[in-house]
Amino acid sequence: MTTTSVVSAFRVLEAVAEHQPVGLSELARAVELPKSTTQRCLLTLQEIGWLRGSDTSPTRWGLTFRALAVCGRGGGQESLRDVAVPVMNELQLATTETVHLAAPDGDHLVLVERIDTSHRLRAFLALGEYIALHASATGVAYLSACSDAQVEEYVSGPLEPQTPDTMTDAEQVWAAVRRVREIGYSTNVGGLSAGISSLGAPIVDSRGAPLAAVSASGPSSRMVPERFGDLGPMVAEAAERISRELAGRR
């Protein structure tokens, strides 16, 4: 495979991660490659187990668990996911809601792990999905561990709405960040997904710099504000445990 082919394959892989599930035409436009080239990349990535195609027609493409597992080990032998999953399992049992782990990629977070609730009505985000910082509990929690300069740089950019309840004003985001720094966890009601409430907390390194964020999420009809005072500290404590464990192993 030539260098150009490798570059094209990675462009396709990253675009699938951002837009999944995505069809060939939309994907070719996103990566600005001919359909024939995009199709070859898709089939190659499918052959080596990084992408999967749907059984529907037209085919829509998404990441496999192989891709997510390999990327999740980017931090070394003792990856963030390895350390976080046992704590996430305990948090899920304690809250009875879906627990998410998100790590940074540029000015977004990416969902790298999810522990589902047994409730039939549940929050759902696909693994590999990109999450806007200002729109999510994990995102605001992550921002709370950033420096003031980093927060200011982020809020000075476009704050696109994800739902009618997304914070799109810089002062709103700043107020939410200051609140997390005060109480230890973020709250989000319908800002990322309509009808879904979430509580998040930052995972940090030994210097307090942000590494990732963890959250508990569920339908707003079940995760009512009256529960936040009980669930929020559970999420914060889980994030602190993961942070301590990571610091100890490194």
Image (spheres, rainbow, N blue to C red):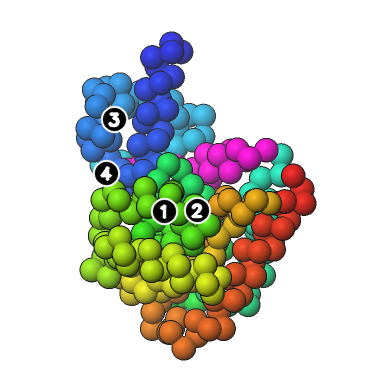
Q: Amino acid at mark 2?
A: Cys
Q: What SS does tag 4 mark?
A: loop
Q: What's the distance in space between the residues labelled 3 and 4, CA to CA? A: 22 Å
- Near mark 3 (Cα within 10 A), the count class, few <14, some 14-19 or many ≥20, is some
Which stretch did the figure color magenta?
60-76
* Identity of the residue drawn at 58% across and 43% down: 72
Q: Amino acid at mark 1?
A: Val
Which of the two discs, 3 and 1, sits closer to the camera?
1
Tell me if 18 is positioned left or right of 228 in this view: left
Name the residue carrying label 3: 31
Q: What's the distance in space between the residues labelled 2 and 3, CA to CA? A: 31 Å
Name the residue carrying label 1: 151
Name the residue carrying label 4: 57
Report the number of numbered marks.
4
> Residue farthest to the top?
2
Q: Earlier in the sequence, mark 2 or mark 3?
A: 3
- Percent from the top left, x then y, of residue 119? 50, 77
Q: Is residue 237 visible?
A: yes
Q: What SS does tag 1 mark?
A: helix
Quarter residue 171 falls in: bottom left
Q: Earlier in the sequence, mark 2 or mark 4?
A: 4
